[in-house]
Image (cartoon, rainbow, N blue to C red):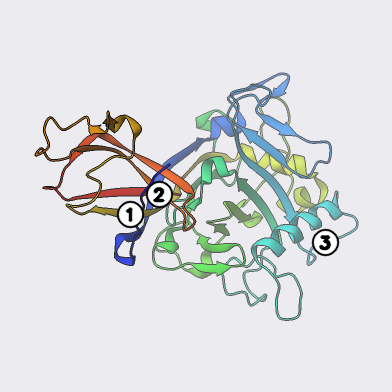
Amino acid sequence: MAKTFKSLLGDDVANTRTLLHEAIPITGTIVSGTYLDADGEHNIKKFSHGMFESVYDYPYLSSSANHIFDVTYGCSSNVSSSTNTQNAKKLNIYNQMAQVLMGYDVSGNIRKFDSDGTLDDSLGTMNHCFFMNFTRLLVKDEIKKNSLRLVLHTSGNVTFAADKRESRVTFGDYLSANEFRTSPAGDYGLVVTSSTADNESSVGLVFYQAGVVVLSSSIFLEQFGTPDDVTHVVSTGTSIHAAQTGSTIDTLADSFRYTIDDIDFNNTIELNSAIYFCRINHNEYNYSSNPTYVTGSKLRVKNNVNDLPITYITSVGLYSPDNELLAVAKLSEPIRKDPNTELTLRVRLDY
């Protein structure tokens, strides 16, 4: 415990913020093929409630498996019908995601997802949506703006054979380089097909802090069905409308996963730092309170009475106003201190 304290003044403390980014690549083989065999996909966890699927980078029973994202499907009350398969669950998923990500309008109604970002509920309303909820392990504090790229096969037959895949389209939040919007869940951007696109051509939304991507089912132009066998060929010939209303959420999530060719984005880690400039004047800390500093009532570091007192600084303690130790900073090597020297030690506390 320190015996003497020195107060830090306003000019002795500075605060900084640093953004660190990490590239996150997710290949389509991980999402829909690497661990596929006749017994199923061992890195895809399905649940008895049938409301979403969880994707892992390894078989999910493995101790080294990491949860990557959840995928599900939902529809709005505009297209809800009691004759639809799992209609209540699809509606609940849509409403749950919408109330968290989009909030409520002035009348207290849940806002629907709006692809053009105008929130006018007249144009661009996304009634059929696929949701990708990325884990904090990947997203960290948020997805970096203008870094999301989704490569999907939006039409035709889809198999794992590269020569049989069709309509490979790249989507991204290109427009967020110049503009983005704000929702109750934080900032969000529009998902479009190119940097020259406009708001009206948006097919989805990406919520950066929430780590959620919402895509309209309209991106799938021709066919969207269920897997036939372990080769997972999406080729039932069923129209997209019929597939969405007549298929379960698990089936739709499976079919969506099989269209994924690649997902890339950069995450963001926000590192906040408080920098303390600990200034030591020439007449301060030239003596130590350590009992071993003195022997026989004499200073160990002085050979005669005229020698200067010497100390070696090894650490800096940061204390609360009531003198409780909060943090300790260790120096890389001891620094000599005597009455002829003044020091400024720079201590950085990250949080």
Residue located at (58% from left, 23% from top): 64
Residue annotated with mark 1? 276
Residue annotated with mark 2? 318
SS at mark 3? loop
Is label 3 or label 2 in front? 2
Residue located at (85% from left, 49% from top): 86
SS at mark 2? strand
Residue annotated with mark 3? 80
Instruction: Say which label, 1 or 3, has the lower sequence index.
Output: 3
Label 3, label 2: how far apart the Cα atoms are: 60 Å
Residue located at (58% from left, 24% from top): 34
Along the viewing direction, whichever of 116 and 325 lies nearer the viewer: 325
Along the viewing direction, whichever of 223 and 151 lies nearer the viewer: 151
Q: Is residue 157 visible?
A: no
Is label 1 or label 3 in front? 1
Dot 1 alpha-carbon crowd within 10 angstroms: few under 14, some 14 to 19, many 20 or more = many
Q: Amino acid at mark 1?
A: Tyr
Instruction: Say which label, 3 or 2, has the lower sequence index.
Output: 3
